[in-house]
Amino acid sequence: MPPGRIVAAALELVDAQGADALSMRTLAQQLNSGTATLYRHFANRSELVAHVVDHVYGEVHLDAAELAGQSWQRSCESVVRTMYAALNRHPNVTRLMLDHTPFGPNAMAIREICLSVLLDSGFAPDLAARIYATLSRYVLGFAIQFSGNPEAHAAYDAEAFHTVDPSQFRATLAVADAMPVPLDVEFSFGLDLLIKGLSQIR
Amino acid sequence: MPPGRIVAAALELVDAQGADALSMRTLAQQLNSGTATLYRHFANRSELVAHVVDHVYGEVHLDAAELAGQSWQRSCESVVRTMYAALNRHPNVTRLMLDHTPFGPNAMAIREICLSVLLDSGFAPDLAARIYATLSRYVLGFAIQFSGNPEAHAAYDAEAFHTVDPSQFRATLAVADAMPVPLDVEFSFGLDLLIKGLSQIR
DNA sequence: ACCTGAACACCGTTCAAGT
DNA sequence: ACCTGAACACCGTTCAAGT
């Protein structure tokens, strides 16, 4: 039983059934095996999860040369959007990313490329570190909050904002037509604010 | 058994032992009761969690009059910081906030105050909605990633960034002294970027 | 009416026993 | 050497039986 097959099956399971569906029992069953076999390849559930997480980071394809040829603003934007796209292809995996700072090879490579762009653009090391931290936290923080079946939420929430007590929630009612804000709009809006803010401190 | 006592005990449990420690069994035990008793007051675990969450939002004390007397920049900053402070007083509760959009009375009140400030400052309804969404998402996204015992992480991570392969991770090594970025620095940095960005689109 | 023990169908993890 | 069934100590939720 190659570890890669276990990780692939785990990712499939999480994608299809959600993060909570990844139990050692269910996974073993899907592989026609027993739970104890999984523990031959991974010390515990957490270690297996770390591999699933880094597999998703492996889907973030950044072209270092292309990024170097653009303004740092455009580069930052495309790094963030590329990461966001990968996380959105596996929305159920995002909540598995909360437990540990990612140190898998793929996550390391992304960080290296992004920091290179910032340093080569003339940002001082401590500023580059802060910018990378802020951008990666923005992506993950956003993706996580996106992950719990968004379309069901949206439909329910839209009504909830309109059926609020008018005397108590004047402002909420005034913006009810605009709520909930579509997620892609919100993502782009916040990202734009961050980059506009960065341009000011440059 | 008043529901308030159940929620208070649940919050204590989560604060002290973490979100995962909140099991119906453990909670019932702490109350010298049985699990089935809890189900008399809450339909399921999710509903109980929603009450715990809104209890924390209840610790966000915003002074509507004071906020109205400041620039919208300062008001936004103090709303975000006040919310962040409350979430940091109960870091283990943040991951319980992922499952549903908060519609508890306390969360509703906070949203109403914040939207009032934005509308009264002349922002159009759809822009106000977007700004509130972005700010509240920023706070929660940040607080969630903060929640997993931060000091343990930081110590471990600082070393990990320094012991990286120099030929492969030139940029990472160059900023290693600045990593990991202290969380309060990172929080203020990102918030500042957002508000600077907002000033530009005003 | 309100509470409860015991049950049901699940977990992560371990370990002796099999091939 | 590698795999596995069965066990251990847990889950959320339900329900018949108690007061």
Image (cartoon, coloured by chain):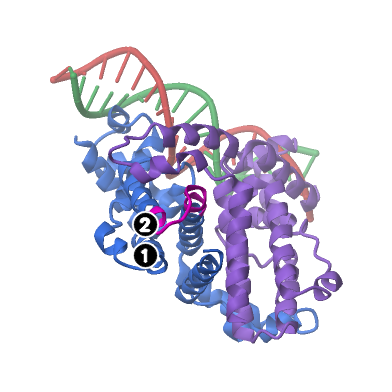
Chain colours: A purple, B blue, C green, D red
Tell me which residue sits at (81%, 75%) in the image. A68
Q: From the viewer's side, name the closer residue of A135 and B21.
A: A135
Report the disc number at residue B117: 2
Q: Residues within 10 Å of mark 2 (few under 14, many from 20)?
A: many
Cβ atoms at labels 2 and 1 below 8 Å apart: yes
Tell me which residue sits at (33%, 42%) in the image. A169
Callout count: 2
Q: Amino acid at mark 1?
A: Ser
Q: Which residues are magenta?
A: B117-130
Tell me which residue sits at (63%, 69%) in the image. A195
Q: Is residue B45 above or below residue B17?
A: above
The chain ID associated with circle 1 is: B
Q: Residues within 10 Å of mark 1 (few under 14, many from 20)?
A: many
Q: From the viewer's side, name the closer residue of B191 and A91.
A: B191
Tell me which residue sits at (68%, 52%) in the image. A87
Report the disc number at residue B75: 1
